[in-house]
Image: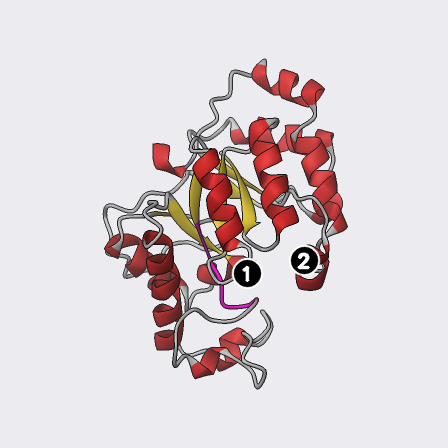
């Protein structure tokens, strides 16, 4: 599966992800439920029911959904940066915020396919047990990869992929690299490739330093010649709802 992160960050991000789904190889996305354009994203999802949609748990960008999570926010009411959130953020506040983001998604009438997180915060050893608890509570698959499961792991019904890679990012945005990633992935039964395609707009530029690279990602993920090469490898594209 090719999962596009940051759905809801801006209209340009939303439209870029849908473009990569309709005309490329993106099969899945995860939505930031605390960002201003998540409602715009929901309308696009309803128009494109074939794309898998999960929740991009967020405590490092924007403002919280939950009330009384003071340890997660700075004086302006925004979340602490990714460099400070683990220092200031209390685990109980993170769990409350994550749960409120999940509930906001469920209130739309849609069912999420899985959870992951902005800046991979849920993969940190202190946050991962919270994410796994919520994945079990709501019967959701979860992205794993950078860290192994806790020693006291107790959720036998956990659904995830056999392999996760974030290698298609930054300076590694070439067709050659993407094809190499897929070639290596053939050693596994199920694989998630993370990506961030987008059309660049002011909303994106205001929220993320990783901006112009996203248009490059979009061009690669929708390149017709590359897609034809991939089809020749007999790879089945799925999303987390298929696990």
Q: Dot 1, how many residues are within 10 Å of its Cα: few (below 14), some (14-19), or many (20+)?
A: some
Viewer-proximal residue among 20 and 155: 20
Residue at 33% x, 45% y is 111
The label number, if any, that marks residue 203 in the structure image: 2
Q: Dot 2, how many residues are within 10 Å of its Cα: few (below 14), some (14-19), or many (20+)?
A: some
Whether residues under marks 2 and 1 lie with C-beta atoms below 8 angstroms apart, the answer is yes
Q: Quadrant of the rendered structure where residue 231 is?
A: top right
Viewer can see residue 194 = yes
Q: How is the image coloured?
A: secondary structure
Distance of label 2 from label 1 (alpha carbons): 9 Å
- Quadrant of the rendering where the C terminus is positioned: top left
Residue at 27% x, 61% y is 152
Circle 1 residue: 36
Residue 138's x, y, as percent?
27, 53
Above or below — where is 10 with respect to 88? above
Q: Secondary structure at mark 1?
A: loop
Residue 241's x, y, as percent?
36, 36
Outermost residue toward the bottom? 75
Boundaries of the magenta span: 55-61
Above or below — where is 225 with respect to 200? above
Above or below — where is 184 with respect to 129? above
């Amino acid at each position: 599966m090719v999962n596009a992160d940051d759905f809801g960050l801006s209209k340009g991000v939303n439209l870029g992800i849908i473009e990569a789904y309709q005309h490329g190889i993106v099969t899945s996305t995860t939505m930031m439920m605390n960002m201003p354009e998540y409602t715009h994203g929901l309308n696009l999802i309803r128009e494109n029911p074939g794309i898998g949609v999960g929740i991009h748990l967020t405590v490092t960008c924007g403002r919280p959904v939950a009330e009384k999570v003071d340890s997660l926010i700075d004086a302006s009411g925004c979340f602490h940066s990714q460099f400070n959130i683990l220092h200031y953020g209390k685990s109980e506040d993170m769990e409350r915020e994550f749960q409120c983001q999940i509930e906001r998604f469920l209130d739309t009438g849609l069912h999420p396919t899985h959870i992951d997180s902005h800046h991979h915060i849920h993969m940190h050893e202190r946050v991962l047990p919270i994410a796994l608890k919520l994945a079990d509570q709501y019967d959701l698959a979860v992205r794993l990869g950078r860290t192994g499961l806790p020693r006291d792991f107790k959720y036998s019904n956990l659904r995830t992929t056999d392999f996760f890679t974030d290698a298609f990012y930054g300076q590694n945005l070439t067709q050659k690299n993407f094809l190499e990633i897929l070639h290596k992935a053939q050693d596994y039964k199920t694989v998630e490739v993370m990506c961030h395609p987008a059309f660049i707009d002011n909303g994106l530029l205001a929220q993320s330093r990783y901006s112009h690279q996203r248009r490059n990602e979009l061009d690669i993920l929708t390149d017709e010649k590359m897609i034809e090469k991939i089809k020749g490898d007999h790879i089945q594209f799925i999303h987390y709802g298929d696990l």
